[in-house]
Amino acid sequence: MTQENFATDAHGTQHWPTEIRYKRAERELVITFDNGARATLPAEYLRVESPSAEVQGHSPDQKQTVPGKRAVAVAELEPIGNYAVRLIFDDGHDTGIFSWKYLYELGLEYDERWARYLSNLEAQGLDRDTAPHRHGPSCGSGGGGCG
């Protein structure tokens, strides 16, 4: 995908999806945008880049590196108005609302973001297959402990 400048709406949307399809077997979200750009976004990538405060924090230095999500899948897609979709993951994470703008950015910046994620995992001694054992509430709405 290439960076382009277009007029935006109140949500910052520059490109509107013309097709959104989740391929369950491949665990990939495939999105085609009105400018012809197409993004294939693995569920693991979407999960570890969730726009939720649990993952992103409230500032860039609070962003969490979420390990152990190689096998995660999207269980459900829920439309949010005409500007976003909530992705509900099979690990219980359901608080990320993915705007069209953010999904477009995730496609555009995939290589850079994925390399940074893998580097952060390694630097923290974490991996894609093992989630740390957590005590306390479980993941999901109001659980607060799953990142």
Image (cartoon, rainbow, N blue to C red):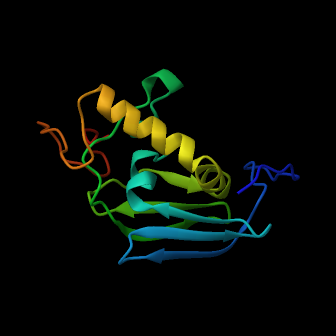
Q: Quadrant of residue 146?
A: top left
> Is residue 27 visible from the viewing direction of this image?
yes
Q: Position of residue 7 (x, y in %)?
A: 88, 52
Quadrant in which the C terminus is drawn: top left
Residue at 30 percent across and 32 percent down: it is 122
Q: Position of residue 26 (x, y in %)?
A: 39, 73
Q: Nearer the viewer, residue 134 or 138?
A: 134
Q: Height in image: 76 above or below 125?
A: below
Name, please, the residue furthest toward the top: 61
Q: Nearer the viewer, residue 51 or 120?
A: 120
Q: Position of residue 64 (x, y in %)?
A: 38, 32
Residue at 52 percent across and 53 percent down: it is 97
Residue 141 as seen in the image, left or right of residue 30: left
Q: Height in image: 73 above or below 6?
A: below
Q: Nearer the viewer, residue 81 or 130?
A: 130
Quadrant in which the N terminus is drawn: bottom right
Q: Position of residue 4 (x, y in %)?
A: 83, 51
